[in-house]
Image (spheres, helix red, strand yellow):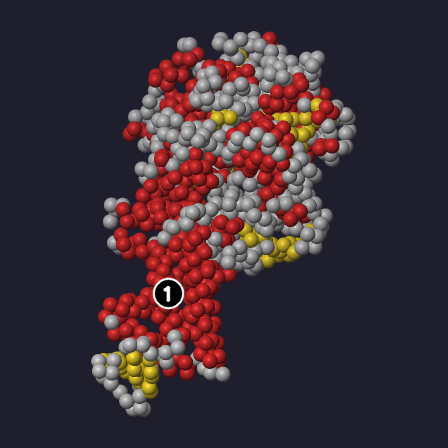
Amino acid sequence: MNLTLKVWRQKNSQSEGYFETHQLTGISPDMSFLEMFDVLNEKLVEENKEPVAFDHDCREGICGMCSMYINGRPHGPLEGVTTCQLHMRSFSDGDTIVVEPWRATAFPVIKDLVVERSSFDRIIAAGGFVSVNTGNAQDANNIPIPKDDADDAFAAAACIGCGACVAACKNASAMLFVSAKVSQLALLPQGQAERTIRAEKMVAQMDEEGFGSCTNTGACSAECPKEISLENIARLNREYLGAKLSSKSV
Amino acid sequence: MAGSSRLDAKIPSGPLEKKWSQYRSTVPLVNPANKRRIEIIVIGTGLAGASAAASLAEMGYKVKAFCFQDSPRRAHSIAAQGGINAAKNYQNDGDSVYRLFYDTIKGGDYRAREANVHRLAEVSGNIIDQCVAQGVPFAREYGGLLSNRSFGGTQVQRTFYAAGQTGQQLLLGAYSALERQIGMGTITMYNRHEMMEVVIIDGKCRGIIARNLITGELERHFGHAVLIASGGYGNVFYLSTNAMGSNVTAAWKAHKKGAFFGNPCFTQIHPTCIPVSGDHQSKLTLMSESLRNDGRIWVPKKKDDNRAPGDIPEDERDYYLERRYPAFGNLVPRDIASRAAKERCDAGYGVGTSKLAVYLDYAAAIDRYGHAEANKNNVHNPSKEDIVKWGKAVVKEKYGNLFDMYKQITGEDPYEVPMRIYPAVHYTMGGLWVDYNLMTTVPGLYALGEANFSDHGANRLGASALMQGLADGYFVIPYTIGAYLSNEIRTPAIPTTHEAFVEAEKSVADRINTLLNVKGSTSPEMFHRRLGKIMWDKCGMARNRQGLESAIQEIRALRREFWNDVRVMGEAKEFNPELDKASRVADFLELGELMCIDALNREESCGGHFREEHQTEEGEALRDDEHFTFVSAWEYIKESDWGLHKEELVYENIKIAQRSYK
Amino acid sequence: MSWLTQTLTSSIGKKVLMSLTGLFLCLFLVVHLIGNLQLFKDDGGYAFNTYAVTMTTFTPVKIISYLNYFFILFHAFWGIYLEVRNRKARNVKYNLIRNQSTWSSRNMALLGTILLVYIVVHMGDFWYKFHNEPLPYVQYTEMLSTGEVFSQVMPAGYTQDVKQVEFVNSDEGTRTVIVKDLYQTVSVAFQNFLLSFFYLLGMVAVGFHLYHGFQSAFQTLGINHPKYSPFIKAVGIWVFAFIIPAAFAAMPLYFYFKQF
């Protein structure tokens, strides 16, 4: 396959970015999208040019590190996969592919296609946990959990924190990410003790990070590589409003 | 055979089942006021690192945690699929701490330390309790209780799981505990930081030099103790199931500063991975071992059979695992399943275009589950289509994400045609040598999880890596570290202006400059690929003297070439993934040599280490217990020069036997 | 900041305000439609004109309508404020976007702005004229026994202090009502092609706005359930995005084509 690649280049967070065009020849349809980038970078090094920086690690769709906005969509044209799981057989010979970084004020560009996503960690640090110190646990089978609840909690917990939801949302909202964690813990008995304070604190941190608000367009869920459901966002709204109405913090 | 005087495993005395509980009750403590003054550095935020950092911070220590990824949640533990073992006996199938201990020792081909493994089995249940309390959504039965499945090398169901994403869920649990402490200010997190050097002052580990991967700045960090939990070194093979960033750098720096390296040649080749499809391949993808629960592995009985799998009739298929190992069948341990696949392919029975693959077939499972569903729904004369439909639905619920992953990568639908699988490098049992306290041979320097050598012997059983990582982090190091730190309460924080820090930083800066100034013509990636090929061909699934000797020469030559011809683009003081890569490859180029030396030295076959010279007539691994019941702990002397120390393994509770799964 | 302002100014709270005001306006649309359906009654505008008087004189209705004006303005300006804020959450725009969401969900602010302009024109056309301009008066005589209604335009220059003069002649068995003839104003106004067309556009905008808006309001309030959400969606799409705008759109069409 022969391809034209339009890639975003940006030296660092302070500098202006621009698009750079590269021609690639002899790309195999069996390559993954990131292996195609490996080929590009190998070529750039040969030409004594600086390779394109991009985030990637596990290359099997679970670490959440890869983050390319491909032809107008986070993680490219397929549903339910990450960039690293996208293969070149999803493109045709002669295609032009435009690759941009995630764009959000809360995800500043570090270099080229690499962005800073620590805002997600700070949201989790604000309340995305159960406060149970090591050694405090009772026997794992002491509290039966209905299978449906456990399954729903798992479906929400499958979030890989890649940020595609933010990248896809016209408002760069992080609601799908936050709602996935709030939902997981709200559905489980272990999460009940901190249920209200968790919703309050995580939303407050999300707002502080500069994400937009949710206008329920659903683009996040449509682009989520783990297909996290919009029901979680409704649940977060419920949890948050319930928390605000019932909690004793004035 | 005598052990080395330099190696004191510090195994507590007393009967095996009392060792840990007695030791835990007598190990010195650090009082809360002193804990606040003691700083601990943790390298890596996978299961071991995150759980250790969180637990130590909960206890009151000041913790600094480092990871090279953009978030601690991305450590490669996240990719573990199948499950985590624990001796809970929830299935009432006769499981016990002893049985888990025994299975692990036997699975490791009698090359692991009894006391460590027993401790691992003892705390395994606590791990499940802890994780459930954190909100880890394990799979459950309709009654609301935890579900289990079976895994290779065992005859009980003791594996807890969360679909095919168990590692992810466990890591997110540990990560949430870590983030909680970060939020409370007891842990300072340094993401996108790579540990470049350890700092030793007066024979004790006192800190590290880290590189901020965003700015390229070198930073000095003091710690009363340093915990290395940076994972395994499978990426030395270039193609492995490890993440692209997984590297040996932290462990290797520790090794070069005095920490002995234990059993470096013990690598695990996982039998069920998606085969290599071409030269462009950058990594291999594992298909969970849990697939062997229901899938049947076979090759055609005829050599070079090019028929489509569906066209090969039942009696022309060779279910070679079931044939060779009737007792365990498709669930034999990984080393055995891998070698059996290699044996069939080498003999010319491989399938697919490369002929380096075997079939993993779900047709029988789909049929079996389809009939079960029909019975459940009281349908007495189900049509064949319905059976297949129902069967597929059950398989989808159990393994859906794995099947999707396979389809995504290969473009083939595994519900319709059998999957093609082939072994690939997956895990390294070897690692930094540690004593019972998980301390390396450098005082104050610890190694946890896959980074240490301790619990799996020569072969790790499935679903035991998650168990070991979390055991080390949650339930071992928080106690054992007291033995060292209780003597450090009088040590004030050493200012990082100390000459040892200055020197260490300078050596790192010099090395970076050297790398950048070679200005050769070949990318670090190319060197990595070439190293990987040498390692896979000559120090992979099967090894022999001649191959290993030539590998050592080839690696030395490749290393020379690297330092003369590597081309590293960009600069030192910026975000520069090429430089990160070059620096890691340089370390792999040294490690590879040691692995070959160790493999050459170990004149026996055991677990994942298969020396072709040492096999039974049936092609099984042939151990030499008389001469090799020891841990090889290698001391770095200078380049290409290592000294061997032997830690004798004493089996007081288990009778060493020929490992049989027949 | 009190907990209430804190809640309402959080990203979720801000949306809740949009949701609640939006749902109120949806309810208003229903009431407004039911009232306006009187336009189709063939009684010379009797029902419609008396309904118009009730809506502007009955105190509870008046209170609700002022609340309604406030909600319209609040919903509009709060929406614009949110849109501006949301745009700031992405300081560098994408070069190429293939967004996987409905067009209307992405363009609520644009649709809302069109609706604001529409409402201003609409209020200027009828509400302002009804309240402030000397519209002609019409007298209706209703036969109490049969319900038949006869209308008679009052002479030019006729005026009265109250909005509705009403007396019953028990001898003749009739009720006589004199009110401003808004019906006539409406029917004349819609004979203008441009204005009718503008109203049609306005209704298309309402349709698209509510196609997303109605169901979105419930989602924002946390109502999303596999059992009930399909119903909410169906009501949003069929009733609010299709039937209601279509019924409103029928009014200018009716009067426009009636003239020929």
* Place of residue B262 in the rendered image (x, y in percent of width and height, measured from the top left): 55, 21
Vertical relation: B126 (above or below) A187: above
Decide if residue B657 is on the left or right side of residue A145: right
Work out whether residue C158 can be spotted. Answer: yes
Q: Is residue B566 left or right of residue C132?
A: right
Q: Which residue is mark 1?
A: C30
Query: What chain does mark 1 sit on?
Result: C
Q: Is residue C111 visible?
A: no
Q: Residue B152 vs residue C166: left or right?
A: right
Q: Write the residue at 29% across / 79% down.
A: C143
Please tell me how many numbered marks the rendered image carries. Answer: 1
Label 1: few (<14), some or many (≥20) within 10 Å?
A: some
A105 in relation to B267, above or below: below
From the viewer's side, name the closer residue of B466 and A110.
B466
Q: Position of residue A64 (x, y in %)?
A: 51, 42
Amino acid found under the numbered disc labelled 1: Val
